[in-house]
Amino acid sequence: MKSPIKLRLTGFLATVALGAVLIGWTERHSWRQIGQLQARFGAMQDGGYHLADYLEAAILRFNHTLLRFDLREEPTDRVRFQEETDALKVWLAQQLERSSAASERELLRQIASAFDQYLIKAFLTLEQSAQINGPGSPAALLARTEKESSHLLTLATQLAHAQRQSLQSALSDAHLALAELKFLLALSLGLLVLLSLSLTVLVYRGMIGPLRVKLIETRALVERQEKLASLGALAAGVAHEIRNPLTAIKARLFTQRKLLPENSEPLEDNRFISDEIFRLDKIIKDFLLFARPSEPQLELVKATAPFRELAGLFRPELERNSIELKCEFLADPQVRGDLQQLKQVLINLIKNAAESIGQRGAITLRTRTKPARFGSRSTTAAVLEVEDTGDGIPPAVQKRLFDPFFTTKETGAGLGLCIAARILEKHGGLLEYQTQVGQGAIFSVILPIAQSPEREPARSD
Ligand code: ADP
């Protein structure tokens, strides 16, 4: 199964790839649009849109040259006429090649063929006036040349009209293309903002967020460790000092008891003092356990093993208080642990659960597995849970739950949970809880799984 961070990373990479493709496509499309616009407006600048004017002027100029030749009969006019009409022919062929609009091309073709006709007539006229020898009637020639060129001029006017239309369509295309570019630009910008935002969120969630949580957890742990260390040193010193006189008192009480007569009041007092000394001794033992927990003797233990032993032990006492003890063994992986210490932890949790319920309720002992993190290592863990239907833990108590000597009970020592947490720490495990006021609590012992049960069957049960 993919971890959430891997999934998030894959999602982000997919988004980045999609964003990059979209931005790339937008850019390519925009460049193409701009290129097309540039080409069209370049053609306008080249004079392509003044074709009709140029043509009109040329025809009028040819008519004028024809007239002048007729009047003066100078051969240079004839040569010039020849040269200029040749140049116009070349020019017309070039315009036909350049023109992209179908209507314009058609008109240019018509103009080219009309111009050929015009030239045939014009050279015929020139021949005739050369044969007449002497200037002809200028009015008659003018009328003839105007007649020949009128079709050409009409075509030139039509070309001008087609060009105007083409210009208008180019402008409206440019308008549309600009609107499209504007939209694409806004889209790319939006995408960039979205990508940056998701990158920020990802970096925060994937790196800064967990780091912050870890920092807070580490700080709390360090504070707890410091408290425990100083308390541990103090506790060890005090316990040692108290234990010696206690041992001496116990010895004296023992010798005194032998000298006292049976059923006498001093013997009763002696017994009472002995009991209290025993209680004191137990508190000091707990104290020392908390201050200097013994190193766990690690061995392979099945997760259900401590629960199976404890269930039988606790059931009669719990039943007296109408508390039902349920077992829900959903998994039975092996862990590396000290069975006695694990039992000590669970005894504490079961006692707390029973005290929270008081009378009538249920305690569930559950084993299961779940993914967990131990430091920087993510793995599957064995979970040993004690769930109760008691009062739950109010927020004010939750804040101090693992503080040494914190208790809400009259006769409590307030060391149970911190000893449990310390023992599990030494096992490389964790103690977690969930609670809802009025609905009970679940305390979970979480330990790394030692070996997969399929690979090596459990030795003991
Ligand atoms: P003690 O049992 O001696 O008070 P612990 O360290 O075991 O010491 O528990 C500290 C406090 O946590 C208890 O006094 C109690 O208020 C609270 N507590 C622990 N377990 C539970 C539970 N299952 N339900 C409600 N409160 C709990």
Image: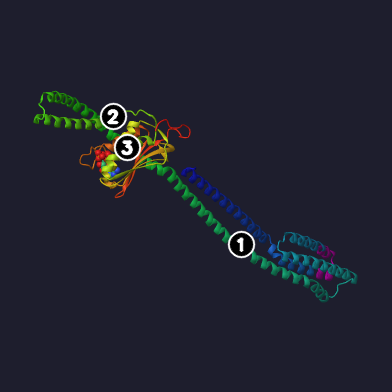
Mark 2 — residue?
A: 292
Residue 420's image quarter? top left
User: Residue shown at 79%/70% (left/top)?
Assistant: 63
- Relative image position of residue 421 (x, y in whole percent): 32, 36
Mark 1 — residue?
A: 174
Per the image, label 1 sits on a secondary structure element best described as helix
Mark 3 — residue?
A: 312
Per the image, label 2 sits on a secondary structure element best described as loop
* Residue 24 appears in the figure: yes
Pointer 3 with pointer 1, Cβ within 8 A? no
Q: Earlier in the sequence, mark 3 or mark 1?
A: 1
Residue 147's image quarter? bottom right
Q: Quadrant of ligand 1?
A: top left
Task: In the rendered structure, find residue 63 and report the number of the disc placed on it.
Answer: none
Q: Earlier in the sequence, mark 2 or mark 1?
A: 1
Q: Is residue 137 magenta?
A: no
Q: Is residue 73 magenta?
A: yes
Which amino acid type is shown beneath numbered disc 2? Arg
Image quarter where the C terminus lies is top left
- Distance from label 2 to label 1 (Cα)? 85 Å
Q: Observer-nearest residue: 44 or 130?
A: 44
Main secondary structure along the magenta-highlighted residues: helix
* Magenta residues (range): 65-81
Q: Earlier in the sequence, mark 2 or mark 3?
A: 2
